[in-house]
Each structure stands twice: as structure tokens, then as C-alpha cells.
Amino acid sequence: MSLSSRTLRNLPSIPRRLHPSTPRRRHNSTFESKPYRPYEPPSPKPAPSQWTPKAALALGCALSFAFTAGKAYQKMQQLNVDYDRDDKFRAPRYASVKEMEKAISEIETVLGRDAISRDEEELKQHGYSEWSPANISTLPIAVVYPKSTDEVSKIAQICHKYKVPMTAYSGGSSLEGNFSAPYSGISIDFREMSKILAFHEEDMDVVVQPAVNWVSLNTTISSSGLFFPVDPSPSAQIGGMVGTNCSGTNAVRYGTMKDWVVNLTVVLADGTIIKTRGRPRKSAAGYNLNGLFVGSEGTLGLVTEVTLRLAAVPRECGVASCVFTSVRDAASTASSIMRAGVQVAAVEYLDATQMKVLNDGAYTAPKFWKEAPTLFFKFSGSKASIAADIKEVKSIVAAHKGSDFEFARSKEEGDVIWSGRKQALWSLLAARPEGTELWTTDVAVPVSRLADMIEESQKGIKDLGLFSSIVGHVGDGNFHEAIMYHRNDPAETAAVTEHVKKMTLKALEMEGTSSGEHSIGLFKKAELLQELGPDTLGVMKSIKASLDPHWLLNPGKIFDTPTATGRVWKWQQK
């Protein structure tokens, strides 16, 4: 039964009853709202701590270990620049004979059988020099004759793969054991790379391969009115000249090899081919890599192409000589000429023994000499400038008690006078006593100390009692000793060795150098260490390790190859 809306309206009202627990509320006639309160969630109860004593101990240990490791790493980083440290460089592992044979087989496959020689005489030629006192019994296992930069790169890649030592060979006239093979390996002879690749006459430069002989180069380009002025031994080739930073009689006017290299193409130990820079006469772009490779004796890379600066042939040349009663007067004359600013092309010294050798063999006939200390001069320029230079030099010679000043008045006379200097070495070799061998070495000192140095050297030679002489490029403080000795006589060999070592140390005491031209090779490594110190030598080793980390290129030269040692850090010893 349903109720209608009208019925519902007519029903009596029923008072509202509340539950006894419900509080009564008083309502005003007007609506009253309570102030707004934003919602605030209930505060969470704090979680129980997770840092138990064990966890805290573990964290403390971890932080302590990290701090200790950081300090150790910092110490190790400091030691990485400690160039005096014995164990800084890893000792190389060279190929066994079996591995070398595999490398030779691969090279033969790539270059052909004719490119490799195992002939005993050729091996001896590439590991032993009659010019050098630093010969050893070890020889290369093979000689390889590449014909291009690409072939040199392939050889290097194969040798790098098997860890076979590589020694560059060019000319073979080096004097300090520069191409010896203490770890055997392969000798890379550039004999087949003897071409002049490009001649830029207008730019006064020429691009050559390493086996180009400097005398032949000058003959080839003579019609151009240009020449290459660095003049070492007539048998020297460009590759070896770069390796030793050689010079010669013209150095006082034209400088050394480093001054005439525009750029180099170099094959690195792993076969990478680089070019040090472009062909302009000057460049300020990046590192001077020419200066890095010139004089490095093939320990950093294999030079396969060289761009050389050329000079204009002087319009006129003049030659003169004079005699002195003492070494000191001759050396003082050379020093005074340089201080006066006279543009001499060469100032050369020959001692009394050498002048006697020239006379005895009639090497400069019809010219004969007074057997006394003698200076030879070269002049170049115009006729007027040469005449002025000669006049000034003659005056300086007279002031230092010089005599017999002789100036060539024709080219023929000049050739005769200068032949005394050119024939010095060959005449000495011809005059050496039977059964003896030549030991020749060089040092250089500041020009002001040259007289002292030569006098000290002569005293030592006199005490030896052996046939010897002194020849010097005295214009730049450099001179050579040539001593004839019996290599098979241990006592005599030891005496000569001691004399040469003392002479070198004396040069270092005078702020000189252990080698002005011949470079370091095997023989003068200890003297180089004394000259430069362990830190400087360490920098050189770091450069070597960066470019040749396996020490494959001409190892054992300039400084010793690293050897295995027990690793004990210096900071651990404190």
C-alpha cells in the first residue's frame, strides 16, 4: 500500500529522537561556518634505525680503504714523473731465434727473396765497424734491403708483430758503435733507396732518400749554383747524417745537420708513416718533430725521405794557412777571430804530428809544411769582402805570435793548401803502425776553453806513448783525437779507454759535451748520463717509450735498454 504525497503532508510531525550518546548541537538561525583548515596527513611513525654496529664498522673500513688507496695512487702518480726511477720503464721481451725466423720468412714473402741477405760477410759489415772502438760480438740475423717507404713500413709491421729489433744502416761510417746489434734482430740497409726524388731549384730545397751521398748530391746539382753545405766524411750518407746530427769543416759558417732539414718522412716502430711538417722554410705549427728525430740515431723512427735546404754557392772562395809555436796560441787565435765577427767559412786545426805525417807521405806535394801546430782557413763572399776578412785575420794571427801566413791567390793554390786538411784522416790511416787499429773520438767545449782542453788531451796522449794526433774544428770548439792502438792487447786497450773517458770527463768539467759530431752510440752512454743527469735522460727514455714501447728501434744506443727489476716503490722504502 503506497501513500500519496498529500497524505504525507497531513501526517502529524514526529519529534526527532537522538541516540543518547549523540551530543546535542545548538544551531543559530543564521548559517555559521568554521574556519578552513588544510588537510594534514598524519605524521608517520619513525622507521627503526638500519645502522647496526656491524654496518657502521663496514662503512668505516670502506672509507679507510678508499683514503689509503687514494694516497697510494697519488704517490704512484708522483712517481710517474720521477724520471730517475729504475723501474719506471718496462723491460722489453725480444723475439727468440725461432720468432725471428718467422719474421724473416714473412718479410721474404712480402718483399721477395732478393731483398734479404743472410751472408756472413754482410752480417759482419752491418754489425762491426773497423772505425769504432765499441764493437761487440753480436750480429744481426739478417739484412733487409727495402726500396720504398711503403716497404720499410711493411718490414716494421712484421718486426713489431714478432718483437724483432730493427737497426737502420746508412753509409756505415759511424764511430761510436751506432749501428751495432746488441740484441741481434734485423739490419735495415737503405742501399736501394738512393734517389733524388725532387729538386725545387726556385725554393732552394731538394727531397732525397736516406742512401744519397752528400758529395754525389752536390755534384748532381752543381749546375744550379746551389749546394748542400754540411760536409762530414766523404762516405757519409744523408740518413746517417740525420741520425747523428753530423757536421764538418763548414759548421762554423753553416751550422750542423739540424739546421738544414726542412722535413722528414719517418716510419715508426709499428709501421706508421708520418711526415714531420710541410715544405716552407719556416713553420710555427705544432711540435718541432724535426728536432726530435735529428740526432736520435734511429732509436725513434726510420727516416725514409728528407727534404734539405740548400745554399747558394759563394761567388768567390779563398783559402789560407798559418803556423804557431803552441797549441794555446792557435786556439786563442781561433777564439779571437770568432769574437771579431769575421765571417770565415772554416777554421781547422792540425797538430804537429799530423803535419809531419803529411810531409812524410808527400800527400800535398809539391807543398810541404812546417811541422808545428797549424790553422787552415776558408773564406767566402765577394772579392772585396774576402780581401777585408783576410786582412783582419792576418792581423789577429800576428797578434797571437802566428807566422807563415799564406793566402792562395788562385783556385789551384787554394786546392793545394786545403788538401792538407782534406788528407788528414787518410794520411793518418796510411801511416799507422802495422797491427794497430784507429780509435777516433771527439768532444766539444766552449771556444774560450779550447786551448785548455787540447793541452789536457795532449798530456794524456803523451803519457800513453802511442802514435796519435789531434785535428779540430776549432772555430766551434770541437776537436778529434785519433789514437793508434793494438786492440788485441788488453792492457793497451784499457789504457786508451781510460784516457778517452778522462778526456770526456774533462770536457764536461769545462761545460762541454761528450760528443760534438760522432753522437753517443754504445760507447759514450755513461758520459751522456754524467753530462745531462738521470732526470734529463729519463725524459729521453719517456719519449722513446712513447714512440717505441717495445724498444725495437736500435735498442741499447744513447742509453741502456730497461732490464727487469724487483718493483719496490721509493715511497715504500721510507
Image (cartoon, grey):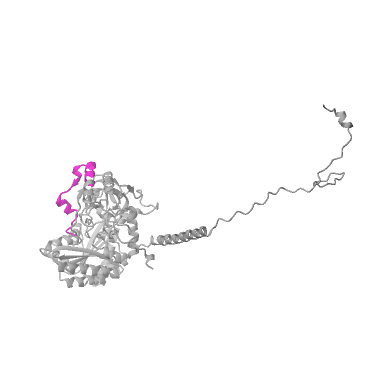
Q: Main secondary structure of the magenta part?
A: helix
- Quadrant occupied by the N terminus: top right
Image-based side of 551 in relation to 28, left or right: left
Residue 297, position as x, y percentages in the image: 27, 56
Given residues 394 and 327, the one toward you in this image is 327
Picture quadrant of residue 295: bottom left
- Confirm whether the magenta stretch covers residue 129: yes
Q: Is residue 474 visible?
A: no
Residue 359 visible? The answer is: yes
In this picture, residue 422 sits left or right of residue 572: left
Q: How many marks?
A: 0
User: In the rendering, at what x and y percent does residue 345 appear?
Assistant: 27, 60
Residue drawn 15% across and 65% down? Answer: 484
**Is 231 above or below relative to 481?**
above
In the image, is residue 7 above or below residue 226?
Answer: above
Taking depth in this image into account, of 23 and 452 the one nearest to the observer is 23
Q: Nearer the viewer, residue 201 or 217?
A: 217
Q: Position of residue 531 (x, y in %)?
A: 30, 66
Q: In the rendered structure, does residue 282 fall within the stretch colored magenta?
A: no
Q: Can you name the residue that lies furthest to the top here? A: 1
State the extent of the magenta-drawn residues as a range.
103-131
Q: At which x and y percent is residue 417?
A: 18, 61
| Position of the C terminus by quadrant | bottom left
Quadrant assignment, res 10: top right
